Image (tube, coloured by chain):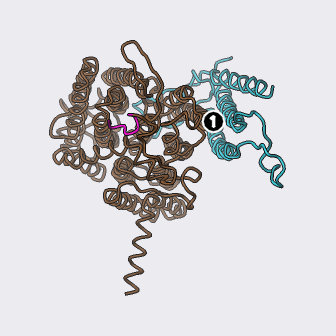
């Protein structure tokens, strides 16, 4: 009896701690990997087990969140607006799930891909610290902590970008580091300004105060300016035009599994922050906005056109850039800029048209998950091709489909997912983007999406034709094959197909995430029940977000 | 008056930082970044003065003395930012040294781009050695 009670209380404690478990798992793995570095085999084992345990922790959290809605963890039991809060809701869980899948796949890949001696140095601890930063950023409910988690994530990524430490890598890392340091300074300025104007750092508390600015003596105009400054930082992290220039060099310099993480997960942290802050926290505020043709009351009416211009520029710059590239990594890096435009496009529509808000955010999330899986798959294929043949330049490759059918099939699946062929996830992502633009009646939006889709077909076809079809070149004929690398890409390719064929869970998760992201009231109530006031008093039609 | 002086000092710091970031010399760029992040920290401290524009350190009011204190939270934030800045500055300086070691120059325009034909691990052999004289 007592044993049962003990077990029940243990399970209860574990359940209450659910949001913090993924963080602790990743952090302990990083520390253990650092401690075991004199024993390379043990270190690799620890690292692998840690990545698996991280997946289990995220799964556990996902189950709890599905069962109970929002989970709130007040660090050290300091109550909400003053202490640090971790919040896990459907949005965080969806992004964490993506992180868990990509990080596990990329880690297994890197055990084989990264030189054994290099792995011993610092690879595993840094890799897991990057996961810690990503996890923290997805879970935090406090805007200053978002800055801290960004720094945790970036500091490890600086080192991972310069990992091979050749002249070109140091140059790319220098550009990446300097830009992100400037971004951090700007983020600090914006956060300081927001604290000075709003008087709080807790996201729920910010949303509560912004919904009724008069009661708290907040002037919304400076808040709008500061949130615009903050947007540049998130755009920099996500690699959205005009803050994309570091992307190609950094993605080409980093080892393939790290690039898969950067493109698949780290980029999405910027997107997550945009959804969380602009669609939930700042959406509560009202300020008159008037553009030529567009007017409105909310911050989102201002950010809608801004995001649209950024999305359109990303789609075209990334698309044309990719078409011109002569090497596979460069092509994929530019494609990554273009694809992030497809993620931002429905967000822009969602911001402009309140009726489509939930649908637009869900479309963006589906596309983000699709891109996360497909692009990391393609970067891993590119790494495997380079390991096998010694080059990634398209003119030097050819006939890979004869030499390695399995690897080629994996690339084919990833490429088709980018293009958006049914029944892959990419199809549903693209379909939802078109659907959202169509429902909004935005001819311009449809034109941009169509142009981007055509460019995607162009560069994927070009990469396929040049590298995988045709007569095998000398590079390809002499190529060796690495089963582990190919195996990982096959697993990812199968997951892309499986998620596309069984699309319901993904779309369900994305819809739940969009709902969770837009439901300000529920968020505020969960985080800070003592101060929660139902929104029909202050926030007008904006509190619910979903309208 | 204090506000005016602070605003002027902050403006100057940001201007100096921006000027340095735009130089061709990598070391100066790093110094520029350092100055800009420190200006952000100073700015954050000024936030603590709030609307009153006055106040003393919270510790001075400990015995129940001074009533008007600055916001201690921003000072905690600045401390965090300083620690993070310290680490990143060290890394940026090491990176600068590494750039000099590998490329033989710290001129931004002389640095070589990623040349793809090279395998992932690039040797130290031929690198751009265009040392410019300004």
At horizontal 30% and vertical 33% (from top left) the residue drawn is A360
Nearer the observer, A159 or A477: A159
In the rendered image, residue A33, in percent from the top left (x then y), is placed at 50, 60
In the rendered image, residue A17, in percent from the top left (x then y), is placed at 45, 63
Question: Main structural element of the magenta stretch: helix, strand or loop?
Answer: loop
Q: Quadrant of residue B53?
A: top right
Q: Relative to A122, is A484 on the left or the right?
A: left
* Vertical placement of residue A233 versus B73, above or below: above
At horizontal 15% and vertical 40% (from top left) the residue drawn is A423
In the rendered image, residue A34, in percent from the top left (x then y), is placed at 54, 59
Q: Quadrant of residue B63?
A: bottom right
Nearer the observer, A274 or A427: A274
Q: Is residue A400 visible?
A: no
Quadrant containing the C terminus of chain A is: top left
Residue A42 part of the magenta segment: no
Q: Is residue A364 visible?
A: yes
Judging by the rendered image, the residue that carries numbered circle 1 is: A196
Identify the colour of chain A in the image.
brown
Identify the colour of chain B in the image.
cyan
Q: Relative to A135, is A484 on the left or the right?
A: left
Nearer the observer, A57 or A168: A57
In the rendered image, residue B21, in percent from the top left (x then y), is placed at 63, 25
- Magenta-tinted stretch: A541-547
Residue lying at the far front in this picture: please name it. Answer: A537
Callout 1: chain: A
């Amino acid at each position: 009896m007592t044993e049962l009670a003990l077990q029940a209380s243990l399970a209860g404690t574990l359940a209450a701690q659910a949001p913090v478990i993924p963080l602790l798992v990743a952090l302990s793995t990083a520390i253990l990997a650092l401690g075991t570095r004199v024993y390379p085999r043990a270190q690799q084992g620890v690292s692998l087990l840690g990545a698996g345990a991280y997946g289990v922790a995220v799964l556990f959290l996902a189950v709890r969140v599905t069962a109970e809605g929002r989970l709130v963890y007040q660090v050290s039991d300091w109550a909400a607006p003053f202490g640090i809060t971790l919040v896990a809701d459907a949005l965080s869980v969806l992004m964490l799930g993506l992180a868990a899948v990509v990080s596990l796949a990329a880690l297994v890949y890197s055990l084989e891909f990264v030189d054994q001696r290099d792995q011993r140095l610092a690879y595993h601890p840094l890799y897991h610290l990057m996961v810690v930063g990503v996890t923290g950023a997805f879970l935090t409910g406090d805007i200053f902590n978002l800055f801290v988690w960004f720094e945790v994530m970036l500091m490890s990524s600086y080192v991972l970008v310069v990992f091979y430490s050749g002249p070109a890598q140091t140059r790319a890392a220098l550009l990446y580091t300097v830009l992100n340091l400037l971004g951090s300074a700007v983020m600090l300025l914006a956060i300081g300004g927001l604290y000075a104007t709003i008087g709080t750092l807790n996201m729920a508390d910010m949303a509560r105060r912004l919904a009724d600015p008069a009661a708290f003596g907040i002037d919304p105009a400076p808040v709008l300016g500061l949130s615009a400054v903050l947007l540049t930082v998130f755009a920099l992290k996500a690699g959205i035009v005009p803050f994309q220039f570091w992307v190609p060099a950094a993605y080409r310099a980093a080892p393939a599994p790290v690039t898969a993480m950067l493109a698949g997960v780290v980029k999405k942290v910027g997107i997550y922050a945009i959804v969380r802050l602009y669609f939930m926290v700042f959406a509560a505020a009202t300020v008159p906005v008037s553009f030529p043709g567009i007017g409105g009351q909310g911050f989102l009416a201002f950010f809608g056109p801004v995001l649209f211009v950024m999305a359109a520029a990303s789609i075209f710059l990334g698309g044309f850039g990719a078409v011109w590239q002569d090497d596979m990594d460069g092509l994929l890096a530019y494609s990554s800029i273009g694809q992030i435009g497809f993620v931002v496009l429905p967000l822009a529509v969602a911001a402009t048209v309140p009726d489509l808000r939930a649908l637009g955010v869900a479309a963006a999330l589906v596309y983000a998950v699709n891109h996360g899986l497909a692009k990391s798959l393609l970067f891993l294929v590119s790494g495997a091709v380079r390991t096998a043949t010694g080059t990634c330049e398209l003119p030097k490759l050819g006939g890979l489909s004869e030499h390695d059918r399995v690897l080629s099939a994996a690339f084919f699946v990833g490429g088709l997912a980018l293009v958006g062929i049914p029944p892959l996830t990419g199809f549903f992502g693209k379909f939802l983007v078109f659907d959202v633009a169509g429902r909004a009646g935005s001819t311009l939006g449809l034109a941009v999406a169509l142009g981007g889709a055509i460019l995607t077909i162009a560069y994927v076809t070009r990469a396929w034709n040049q590298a995988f079809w045709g007569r095998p070149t000398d590079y390809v004929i002499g190529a060796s094959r690495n089963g582990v690398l190919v195996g990982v890409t096959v697993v990812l390719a199968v997951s892309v197909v499986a998620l596309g064929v069984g699309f319901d869970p993904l779309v369900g998760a994305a819809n739940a995430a969009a709902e969770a992201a837009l439901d300000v009231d529920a968020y505020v109530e969960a985080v800070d029940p003592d101060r929660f006031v139902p929104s029909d008093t202050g926030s007008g039609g904006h509190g619910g977000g979903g309208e | 008056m204090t506000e005016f002086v602070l605003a002027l000092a902050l403006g100057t710091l940001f201007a100096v930082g921006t000027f340095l970031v735009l130089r061709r010399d990598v070391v100066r760029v790093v110094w520029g970044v350092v100055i800009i992040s420190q200006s952000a920290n100073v700015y954050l401290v000024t936030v603590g003065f709030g609307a009153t524009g006055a106040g003393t350190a919270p510790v001075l009011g400990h015995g129940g003395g001074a009533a008007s204190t600055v916001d201690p939270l921003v000072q905690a934030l600045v401390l965090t930012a300083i620690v993070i800045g310290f680490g990143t500055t060290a890394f940026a300086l090491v990176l600068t040294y590494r750039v000099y070691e590998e490329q033989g120059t710290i001129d931004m325009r002389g640095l070589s781009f990623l040349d793809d034909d090279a395998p992932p691990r690039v040797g130290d052999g031929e690198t751009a050695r265009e040392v410019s004289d300004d």
